[in-house]
């Protein structure tokens, strides 16, 4: 088994069938990869969907497990434990892989032995049209990343997005699994588990790469674009960073505060550029987002 593709899911019955179908229709030899579905206590028809998928595609190495500890990090760690592949790929339950997705992931890791982990390109699949306030700086909020057509290393504390990421098994053996104190739990918006694990790799001198040809579409539902949703998401980003930094120590927490102040400087510059080019809604949302993140980082009780 070369690759294990892990899909962690919680109550996504409306999107899960399309996500699984996109993996079933890969142009990679089916004997060399598996699809591992980790159900994190879904209360919808997830189990039925998986049973029907297994019947429809008996030629696919498909496994279904339930992780009873609630939380995305628990589900991903269960996937790591169950996986048989040397390359462990994570894709979201509302992301739809291009037909050559697994082929490109495999090709990259075969040709780049020095790379321990990476992440692919993620295009938005808007349920409705893109809002006027959305800018390229806020695209990560909807799990979108496009750094162009060239392979490159993530630097300056940047890292892949969890909807489309992959690791050599040795990454977890050497540096540990996802931090279960971070990441989404149920319908909560807490995150930070991806940042935590990629920082561990980068701080150890490991290389993490952008893999442009490993492409997925990621659904962006209308509800994720409301101000209330973005506000809660941004505040929880700040809270998650505070939890991550405090778990390391006082100096890391202090550096998180310093980096947040530096981001305010950058945000104000972006605001001015958008404002003076008459992109006022984009300008205002940059400031709102930064304010909400700072609220979670500086004032949350952790």
Image (cartoon, grey):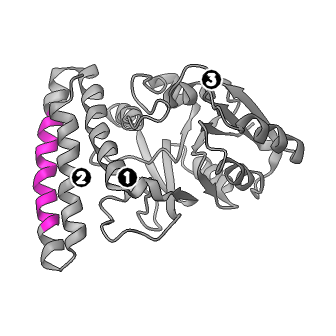
Element type at mark 3: loop
- The residue wearing badge 2 is 289
Residue neighbourhood size for the residue with mark 2, other residues' Cα within 10 Å, grouped as few (<14), some (14–19), many (≥20): some
Q: Is residue 261 magenta?
A: yes
Question: On the picture, is 143 further left or further right than 100?
Answer: left
Using the image, determine if residue 289 lies above or below residue 1: below
Tell whether label 2 touches label 1 (CB within 8 Å).
yes
User: Which label sits on residue 117?
Assistant: none
- The residue wearing badge 3 is 67
N-terminal-most mark, 3 or 1 = 3
Question: On the picture, is 269 further left or further right than 186?
Answer: left
Element type at mark 1: helix
Q: CA distance from mark 1 to mark 2?
A: 10 Å
- The residue wearing badge 1 is 141
- Of helix, strand and loop, which mostly describes the magenta segment? helix
- Nearest the viewer among 160 and 140 is 140
Q: Position of residue 296 (x, y in %)?
A: 22, 36
Question: On the picture, is 178 further left or further right than 1?
Answer: left
Q: Quadrant of the C terminus?
A: top left
| Viewer can see residue 302 | yes
Residue at image position (20%, 35%) is 297
Residue neighbourhood size for the residue with mark 3, other residues' Cα within 10 Å, grouped as few (<14), some (14–19), many (≥20): many
Element type at mark 2: helix
- Nearest the viewer among 87 and 25 is 25
Q: Position of residue 157 (x, y in %)?
A: 29, 44
Tell whether label 1 touches label 3 (CB within 8 Å).
no
Q: Quadrant of the N terminus?
A: top right
Q: Position of residue 43 (x, y in %)?
A: 65, 31
Residues rendered magenta in the picture: 255-271
Residue neighbourhood size for the residue with mark 1, other residues' Cα within 10 Å, grouped as few (<14), some (14–19), many (≥20): some
Residue at image position (45%, 50%) is 209
Using the image, determine if residue 294 lies above or below residue 224: above
């Amino acid at each position: 088994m070369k690759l294990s593709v892990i899909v962690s899911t919680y109550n996504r019955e409306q999107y899960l069938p399309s996500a699984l179908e996109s993996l079933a229709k890969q142009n990679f030899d089916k004997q060399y990869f598996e699809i591992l579905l980790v159900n994190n206590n879904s209360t919808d028809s997830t189990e039925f969907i998986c049973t029907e998928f297994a019947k429809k595609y008996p030629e696919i190495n498909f496994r279904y497990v339930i992780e009873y500890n609630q939380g995305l990090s628990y589900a991903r760690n269960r996937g790591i434990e169950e996986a048989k592949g040397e390359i462990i790929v994570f894709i979201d339950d509302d992301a739809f892989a291009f037909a050559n997705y697994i082929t490109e992931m495999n090709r990259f890791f075969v040709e780049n032995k020095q790379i321990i982990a990476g992440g692919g390109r993620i295009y938005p699949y808007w349920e409705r049209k893109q809002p006027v306030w959305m800018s390229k700086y806020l695209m990560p909020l909807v799990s979108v990343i496009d750094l162009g057509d060239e392979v490159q290393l993530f630097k300056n504390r940047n890292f892949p997005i969890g909807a489309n990421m992959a690791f050599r098994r040795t990454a977890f053996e050497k540096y540990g699994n996802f931090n279960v104190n971070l990441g989404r739990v149920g319908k909560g918006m807490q995150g930070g588990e991806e940042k935590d694990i990629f920082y561990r790799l980068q701080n150890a001198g490991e290389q993490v790469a952008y893999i442009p040809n490993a492409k997925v579409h990621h659904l962006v539902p209308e509800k994720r674009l409301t101000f209330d949703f973005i506000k809660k998401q941004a505040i929880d980003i700040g809270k998650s960073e505070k939890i991550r930094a405090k778990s390391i120590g006082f100096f890391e927490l202090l550096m998180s505060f310093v980096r947040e102040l530096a981001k305010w400087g950058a945000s104000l510059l972006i605001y001015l550029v958008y404002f003076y080019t008459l992109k006022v809604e984009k300008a205002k949302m940059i400031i709102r987002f930064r304010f909400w993140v700072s609220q979670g980082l500086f004032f949350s009780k952790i």
